[in-house]
Amino acid sequence: MRTVLGLFLCCAAGAQSQDAHARLTAWMDRLAQQELDRRAAQIAAVRTVEEAERRKQLVRDKILELLGGLPDYNGPLNARITGKIERPRYVIEKVIFESLPKFYVTANLYRPAAPGKYPGILLPLGHWDQGKPAVQQIAANLAMKGFVVLAYDPIGQGERLVAYDRRLGRSLAGGATEQHFMAGAQSLLAGESFARYRIFDGKRALDYLVSRPEVDPERIGCTGCSGGGTLTTYISALDPRVKVAAPACYMTSFRVLFSGPVGDSEQSLPNFLSSGLDQTDYVELFAPKPWLIASTIEDFFPLEGARQIYEEARRWYRIYGAEERIGWVVGPGPHGTPLPVREAIYEWMIRWLKNGEGDFHEEPVELLPDHALFVTKSGQVSEEGSREIHEIILERFRSRQSKAELNVKELLDFLRGLMSPTRESPLEVTSGPPVPSADYTTQTVAFETEPALEIHGTLLVPRTAGRKPAVLVVETGAGPSDLAKRLAARGAVVLALTPRGLPRPDDRGRFSGDWLMNTRAWLIGRNLAGMRAYDIRRGVDLLAARLDVDPTAIRGVARGEAGVWLLMTAAIDQRLTRIWLDRTPYSLRAALENPIHRNLHAAVIPGFCLRWDLADLVKAIEPRQVLWTDPTDWMGRVVFAGDRFRYRGFEEPDEPLLAALLQ
């Protein structure tokens, strides 16, 4: 019987998790579609080249703003060739250069063996952990067809792993995408996008490519697949040196992408949709230069979204009288570049960069193992003295960090902006039947926190008369926690509230946590932490309206990163007279100091750290009490962070803290 009951509870919790996730996704998707509707009307109004050029300037400026600008560093590349591999018709050179000072990029340059002046191709990489060896087939074929090709390792891949541990021979953060999430959340805290560093690497790679004597700088193309398609899209749209573009397995409209496999940190710019943009804007920035969209039938990036981009881009290119310069190829199979797609890319580059002179058919290539293409002796730039991306982000953050004294009103205004709902509506609560126990009754509740978005909780009401203290327990798992039950047993009216999107479905990310929901939120100009703080405020509304609650004795409790949401709520809601945070990270800024963090995405507030930190929220709450026990770093490790925190001994129970909360 216990086994059956345990299985039932497990399945119920899983269903609740999926349901909460689906509800929030669908709700945000409706907001995304509204933004895209507004954009569609603006695009439809563009009918002349002059109107198109005006929009292009606005779009370019907006994208650069969303990125946080690009680095303005123009120092020397300090490029070195560390080795060569010679083949009968092409040569592979092993190249290392500096993107930023002491920030090294490793690359393989493929060039024809015969002397001459050739078009150049920049080849950004997708999310292959191996980095540049993954594109040997296409790079060698382009070289044999008369192109000079530069394939370079992205941050977190190949010879540029983040948090590399030589003992294990790999990154402590996991795979390439997880490494990108680490830098992505840190960049947001610092008020910028991780994409700015990825794009700048591409710009510096392009600087090196056009510096080569074999390369004609007026004939430059760019192509890449997946994450390389993303960077191809960005670099081509923003760097005028690129004359021909062919991104593969990336381009798809957010009309169909938003509720699906949204890309990672560099692929999803904050406020992108709320600024009136979609992926087609990159193609339109490039017009009327030749742009080929490459897709596959079974790609997880929806084919329908690629079709929508192509159809809109065709109309845009038609304004310029250049419809023949926009193309779309669809290959068989899953995500990747199958032979028909590769040959379409060869043909596109030959057509526009070599006057159509050459054979686009692919030839066999001897594929080398990863180590044979290493540029560095150790196989990792960090072992050669390179800085890591979190150090670059931290350096820029410190150069921009405000030194002004705390202005509480400005902080509270900022928080209210983060917590601002689409529309404030009266609280209408739906309750389930009460279930009695020895000390209290339990009752499920649901209410609209924002129009058309429902969240759930559980009320635990003591079986005693009169007004009682109340405690809102912020839950991140399913059902009321043991802590909520113990508070109710002590005589408090307890609302165990689960904010929107929680419980979170299990995923494979070791550290990234709530990245997907956070990414969707920032695309539409919302903030996940701010929205969940607003949900907590609505929970306070529920408690304050109850006749059995003493409105002068409403408390709040949260554990882990949920404590950040509760801090935000308490800062602007005077009804929370005391809060208790347990094992909550003591500082957002502290997350910038190390390459790895855990579930930072659940608490990221873009740009917040430039002016404030969590200690400022505590000051804004004063003289109300914040009881903060066992503060942690962003790996969940309890650390000493000052005397204002309380530290518990080994296996010290919660009971004294529950008493302090309710006194």
Image: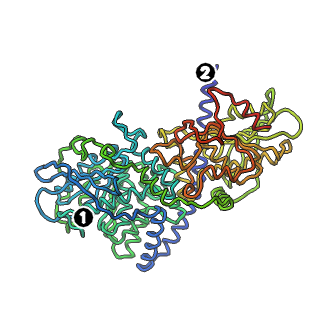
| Element under disc 2 | helix
Farthest residue, direction top: 1
Mark 2–mark 1 CB contact (< 8 Å): no
Q: Position of residue 207 (x, y in %)?
A: 28, 63
Q: Label 2 belongs to which residue?
A: 3
> Which part of the image, by quadrant, shows the C terminus?
top right
**Depth check, front residue: 596 or 56:** 596
Colour convention: rainbow
Q: Residues within 10 Å of mark 1 (few under 14, many from 20)?
A: many
- Three-letter amino acid code at disc 2? Thr
Q: How many marks?
A: 2
Q: Residues within 10 Å of mark 2 (few under 14, many from 20)?
A: few
Q: Which label sits in the foreground, 2 or 1?
A: 1
Q: Position of residue 370 (x, y in %)?
A: 25, 42
Q: Quadrant of the N terminus?
A: top right
Residue at point 62%, 43% (across, down): 562
Going by the numbered disc 1, the residue's amino acid type is Val
Task: Residue under label 1, please give it.
Answer: 210
Identified at 64% across, 24% down, the residue is 5
Q: Nearer the viewer, residue 336 or 125?
A: 125
Q: Position of residue 181 (x, y in %)?
A: 46, 47
Does any portion of residue 448 appear in the rendered image? no
Quadrant of the rendered image containing residue 32: bottom right
Observer-nearest residue: 653 or 505?
653
**Horizontal side of residue 28 vs 180, given as left or right:** right
Q: Is residue 317 above or below residue 80?
A: below
Is there any visible trace of residue 223 in the rendered image? yes
Q: Where residue 357 sits in the image (x, y, percent)?
A: 17, 65
